[in-house]
Amino acid sequence: MTVNVGVIGAGMIGADHIRRLSTVVTGARVTAVTDIDADRAAVVAAGAGARALDTGQEVIGAADVDAVLVTSWGPAHAESVLGAIAAGKPVFCEKPLATTAEDCLRIIDAETAHGRRLVQVGFMRRYDAGYRAMKEVIDSGEIGDPLMVHCVHRNPAVPERYHSEMATHDTAVHEIDTVRWLLDDEIVSAQVLTPRRTRHRFEHLQDPQIMLFETAGGARVDVEVFVNCQYGYDIQCEAVGETGTVRLPDPSGPVVRTAGRQGSAVLQDWKDRFAAAYDVEIQEWVDAVAADTAAGPSSWDGYAAAVICDANVEALHTGRIVATGLKDRPDFYA
Ligand code: NAD
């Protein structure tokens, strides 16, 4: 079976997923594309041999669309996801699932009422080979119960429009989802420490930030977000258990020795770091749709990320330890 995909939002990641669906992933083709920028939709659709449609609702309702990919701006996600659920069509939604916890709960209510999972959220680190290998070690019990996780998320630089709350919503959100998944545990509180700020930043930005999370099971998680580190895109993660540790492998590259030094390149762009993970993520989504099942990060994971991010932003602004106040996970998402 070939899955016919309709895409809502043909910007940077939308166009990249359309290329992926057209040339990398097997078992899918893009049949319809929309964007509020109609010219952009037309160009991207033509490149994929698809039709450009005027609205997201037209894409969702199209007879030649089996499943929907939502890659518009965050504030527009909820409407498209709710529309796909109402039409009974599987939907992959790039993060965030929605920009408020209330909208995430509306999606959860609609999906639950539908009776089976239709929604997958685009937390792609769960598809990275290194993180998957880490999870296998943790799940095997080889390092005992995990007690601590140390994470680092560094970017070379960010533009002026990046503000302090984006360190949570756009950057640490990936660690928040990954740690919940790695530990199979829930984050119950958040705290943010604000070190001396780097001079390599725009004036309004608190950079770096150290985020401290506690899980329901009592594990402690620290996340260093430093988005103007200058030297490269650097993702690190180490879980410390009762009898050992497991560390995310660095991307491999040739080790060069010259001029009295040895070393390998540090990647500069997140798209290069996680390119393979995106391929696996979209392939597994297509496979699940074709098999009439759902897998991967769920609406519940999208809701949890929204609630934890809100608590973390409150912690940043107040300096306090903030309880996340997550609801209990319904059996539907067990
Ligand atoms: P972008 O600005 O390049 O593209 C967004 C596109 O959506 C634009 O072309 C815009 O015109 C269109 N759009 C906005 N509202 C719309 C609507 N109501 N209907 C149709 N089209 C609409 O942004 P981007 O970088 O491609 O990011 C898109 C989404 O993907 C964001 O939510 C972002 O957080 C997410 N994202 C996730 C990852 C990841 O690592 N998982 C990486 C990049 C982006």
Image (cartoon, rainbow, N blue to C red):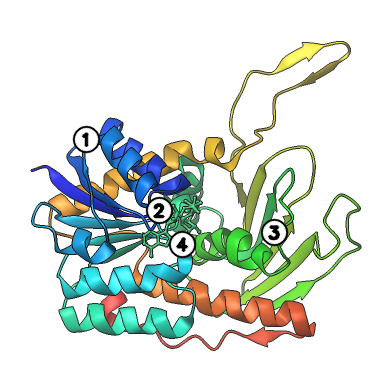
The answer to whether mark 1 and mark 2 are in CB contact below 8 A is no
Residue 73's tag is 4
Would the CB of label 4 be found within 8 Å of ligand 1? yes
Element carrying mark 3: loop
Residue 171, given in percent of the width and then of the height, sits at 62, 58
Element carrying mark 1: loop
Vertically, is 304 above or below 125?
A: below
Which image quadrant: the N terminus? top left
Q: Nearer the viewer, mark 1 or mark 2?
A: 2
For image coordinates 28% across by 74% down, the residue present is 82
Residue type marked 2: Asp
Residue 182, given in percent of the width and then of the height, sits at 49, 60
Distance (Cα) linking label 2 and label 3: 21 Å
Disc 4 crowd, CA 10 A, few/some/many (<14, 14-19, 20+): some
Judged left or right of residue 121, residue 54 is: left
Distance (Cα) linking label 3 and label 1: 35 Å
Element carrying mark 4: loop
Disc 3 crowd, CA 10 A, few/some/many (<14, 14-19, 20+): few
Disc 1 crowd, CA 10 A, few/some/many (<14, 14-19, 20+): few
Residue at numbered disc 2: 37
Judged left or right of residue 63, residue 253 is: right
User: Which corner quadrant of the image does residue 204 belong to?
Assistant: bottom right
User: Which corner quadrant of the image does residue 300 belong to?
Assistant: bottom left
Distance (Cα) linking label 4 and label 2: 12 Å
Distance (Cα) linking label 1 and label 2: 18 Å
The answer to whether mark 4 and mark 2 are in CB contact below 8 A is no
Element carrying mark 2: loop
| Residue 251 visible here | yes
Residue at numbered disc 1: 49
Residue type marked 1: Gly
